[in-house]
Amino acid sequence: MKSLTVSKDATLLQTIEAINVGAKQIALVVDENSKLLGTVTDGDVRRGLLRGLALDASVSEVMNKTPHVASPEEDPQEVMAREFSKSIHQLPVIDASGKLIGLLTDQDMLVAAEISTPVVLMAGGKGVRLFPLTKDVPKPMLKIGDQPIIEIILRKLHAQGFRNIYISVNYLAEVIRDHVNDGDWLGLKVTYLEEAQPLGTAGALAQLAGKIGEPFVVMNSDLLTNCDLRQVVKFHKKQSAKATLGVREYSFQVPYGVVNIDGNEVESISEKPVHRSMVSAGIYVLDPSALGLIPTDEFCDMPTLLDSIKSQGQKVVAFPIHESWLDIGRHDDLAEARNNLDHWLDY
């Protein structure tokens, strides 16, 4: 239970770390006597980030101070069945004094239902920053432990209920096809989108025009994340968006005092300021109507497609991803993934 708890003085970043380490999509805020003060779900965090909260904001900014709770005398199965009907998926257990003694969750009681939402994995890149490792092996086939990156992704998708998978291939495509095959051994249906030449991060999607009739997920095949993609799809539909872009906060500190000047007059000085930006996380949800904006057999990057959608007055929204996330683009990233096997191989 300790890994799931944070103090009332915790920051948003510390709360996110507790959610990720606990792997229950919730953090429990307690006082020095372990009395429950409130809860923070991953959804609470996301809404806070969308409101513009910084990672050093107080947990109190996003905390639910009146959460649903259970007592140790109640039957866990009955309690979760009742609360699940109210869309409550985690339930703290407290004693008569309000002290936290446990957590009930539907994750231990339910098997992920199969969903029809298609997922497209973009796997056609050359992975030039990882040469010479990618000279004879495409980046998605580099191994983390004894499993290629793309297999880990596919197993995570299966665990979340996804079954209908498309993989775009170009560079060393046969290596990916020989390993994944039709996906049946993973409980998946895999179809390949062949790129005769590199088509960018969106170009291969043109092949799906007329073949998909519902919103679908697009994901880079060189990233590992514990984000529940079902939540991204749910968010996309609720927003009635044409495109949803997964984003993460990226911050860096300038190692010097920054001087703002007007002409030769100093207006202000900031000592080693921290700059924060939202960056693309390589995860998208698109409405099938967006496929008509992609030229056939021509190079098209995802930013170009999103700009085209925006230029038509259509809605493009951002979904903050605070869960564990790693883009394996460099040798250091690959080493980090390999040094944290247990974390990434948890389906």
Image (cartoon, rainbow, N blue to C red):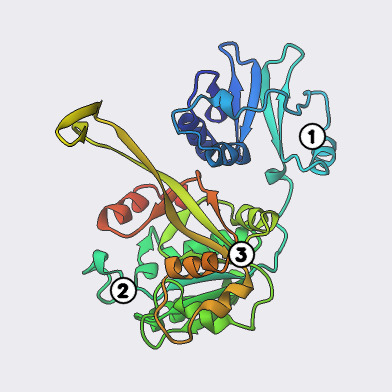
Tell me which numbered mark, 2 or 1, is placed earlier along the sequence: 1
Tell me which numbered mark, 1 or 3, is placed earlier along the sequence: 1
User: How far is the residue under mark 2 from the one under mark 1?
Assistant: 50 Å
In the rendered image, the vertical position of residue 339 relative to residue 328, given as above or below: above
Q: Are marks 1 and 3 in contact (CB under 8 Å)?
A: no
In the rendered image, the vertical position of residue 286 relative to residue 34, given as above or below: below
Closest to the camera, between mark 1 and mark 3, is 3
Q: Residue 255 placed where, x, y %?
A: 20, 34
Tell me if 36 is positioned left or right of 220 in this view: right
Q: Is residue 1 something one can see in this rendering? A: no
Q: Which residue is mark 1?
A: 76
Q: Which residue is mark 2?
A: 126
Secondary structure beneath label 1:
helix
Callout 3 amino acid: Lys
How many neighbours does mark 3 have within 10 angstroms: few (below 14), some (14-19), or many (20 or more)? Answer: many
Residue at x 27% of width, y 77% of height: 136
Callout 1 amino acid: Pro
The image quadrant that residue 265 belongs to is top left
Q: Which residue is mark 3?
A: 242
User: How far is the residue under mark 3 from the one under mark 2?
Assistant: 29 Å
Q: Residue 12 placed where, x, y %?
A: 50, 30
